[in-house]
Image: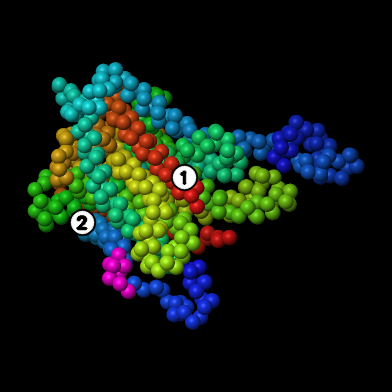
Amino acid sequence: MRSLKDSVATAPTLPLSTGERPRERRLGPMMFLIVLWLSLLVAVVFLLTLIVNIVLEGGSRFGLQLFTEYPASSPDRAGARPAILGSIWVIGVTAVLTIPIGVAAAVHLEEFADKKHWFNRVIELNVQNLAAVPSIVYGLLALAFLTLIGVRDKNIVIGGALALSLLILPVIIIATREAIRAVPSEIRDGSLALGATKWQTTWRQVLPASVPGIATGSILALSRALGEAAPLLLLGALVFVSFDPNGLLSGFTTLPIQIFNWTGRPQEGFHELAAAASILLLGLLLLMNGLAIFIRNRYQKRW
Amino acid sequence: MLANTTASVTEATTTASTGGPTTPSGHPQRSLFAGRARPGEAVIKLGLRLAATVAILTTIGIIIALLVPAIGFFREVPVFDFLFGDRWAPRFADASFGVIPLVTATLWTTAIALIVSVPLGLGAAILLSEYARPGVRKTLKPILELLAGVPTVVYGLFALQFIQATVFRDWLQLDTGAFSVLAAGLVMGIMIIPTVASISEDAMSAVPMSLRQGSFALGANRMQTSLRVVFPAALSGVMAAVVLGISRAVGETMIVAIAAGNQARIVGGPLEQGQTMTGFIANAALGDSRVGSLEYDTLYAVGLLLFAITLIVNFISIRLVRRFRQAY
């Protein structure tokens, strides 16, 4: 579009050269543009309806009690304290497990691997495919793995973190690769020309330059893990937890699982609690998404 | 450089004892480009390679984890009865393992989700790629992507409480129960819009500007250019987006587990309830199935079918994306 305008700008007698955007004059194209805007509008209105509905439903229960109380048989006394702490534990361990491995794998694929070699092509195909494997399959994998190594009580923090790590690993690898690819090769050439080794170049030039992209991708991946419930369901995370999780082998439940639990109860009070916990979860995820977008816009360099 | 470092690993001890090549000690210098031996870097490179191998190990792990219990299952239940049987009652006394009811529910929710997400996603993609100025695009895209960030349990809650209970039953007075595949499919469709939109937009943005300029030069307006030039040129990318949308819809679990229903019967209409493949796995996981029991193996047989379906769909999508990447 821009280049069209530029080429026109050299002929100042044409009316298009005023710099105004082309307007739709006929009915057909006008209707088409309206339909396009409507399709976007439907999505946005749906999102707003969802948020408003959840806030109206759960607003009255959204208070200190949600953060301090343990689940109970009566909605008036129940809270999501163990679920909140469980989510923090599981996501924290997931981040520690996944980010180093994901970044390392991406560095290997982008900087060191011979892209024509069959082994690296298999890895690449695998990463692409794993990114689209249903999340519940990762739950089945974690369940089978924990059974294999003889863990009896599978609902433990490290087990849940394992399932979520495998789930978001491809996401982090793909995001990191894109960030590394965006670093111009002149920077690598300059570093190598000064006598740095390939690894020194990667560690001191390429990686620091791609930190904003890696951070954005990692935050988005972790926000996906935070909202995920299906794989944890398989490990048996839908349990009555009335204690604070306190270690890698501790039993746990998470916020999404707690919401699922409350949604399935017959009493109206629990549905309100589910909505209240959803407000918290949605708020956290909006915050994480906002942070990711902020980092992308603020720190990402354009070369 | 790389070759030099690996070649000089063996020299590491000798150069270290003489003080290395950097100290001017009068010794005959080694080649100027040889550099210091760095055994540490070899270890790092090995570590990086191992990290990348995790992707392959995961795939192998998934296949083994699904196949072993599934083989145990198919020893008791013939494959034919599983794939073509029309009664799913794994917990009854006269147990029956025909997967068709689960498949019909999955087909319904997936079809409804596609009917919602494909037109809306493509509309949004054309708008963002062909009409929106960079500034507008920069604000609209993150808003659209928020739809993909909403947790699926929250979508499920919304589908059950608002779409099904309030809109369908109270406002529209539809003849439907507490659950329906329509409510689950609709909400799932909205969830998939960003997936469809962002991949199609990538494909449309990759169409060279010269094609559009040629179209404009012939007197076409933007609608004609979008529909008759850009869209056909980006078709393989658009198809990839739709196919990936299918994969997301088939594999989505929480929305259908909450809002589609939990009785496995053949679904005949959108207002009926039905249990999907993922819905069954999620529900069965709630029960206490012992390792090695037929119930436990059933979980993996359905999981294997689900994995096989999404695997085929994913490879079609990857193929299509490669084609549009190669084209321009």
Q: Is residue A30 magenta?
A: yes
**Image position, residue B120 (x, y; %):** 30, 56
Q: Callout 1 environment at 10 Å: few (<14), some (14 to 19), or many (20+)?
A: few
Residue A90 in view, yes or no:
no
- The way the protein has been coloured in the rendering is rainbow
Please name the residue that numbered disc 2 is placed on. A57
**Image position, residue A13 (x, y; %):** 49, 82
**Image position, residue A88 (x, y; %):** 39, 46
Dividing the image into 4 quarters, which one contains the N terminus of chain B? top right
- Identify the image quadrant of residue B219: bottom left
Identity, as a three-letter code, of the amino acid under mark 2? Glu
Q: Which mark is residue A60?
A: none
Q: Nearer the viewer, residue B44 or A43?
A: A43
Please name the residue that numbered disc 1 is placed on. B322
A277 to A251, vertically: above or below = below
Q: Is residue B55 magenta?
A: no
Residue ranking furthest to the right? B26
Residue sitting at 58 percent across and 60 percent down? Answer: A303
Q: In screen coordinates, is B190 left or right of A172?
A: left
Q: Callout 2 environment at 10 Å: few (<14), some (14 to 19), or many (20+)?
A: some
Mark 1: secondary structure = helix
**Disc 2 chain ID:** A
Which region is colored magenta? Answer: A25-32
The residues tagged by marks 1 and 2 sit, at their Cα atoms, a distance apart of: 46 Å
Residue sitting at 56 percent across and 41 percent down? Answer: A109
B205 to B93, vertically: above or below = below
Identity, as a three-letter code, of the amino acid under mark 1? Arg
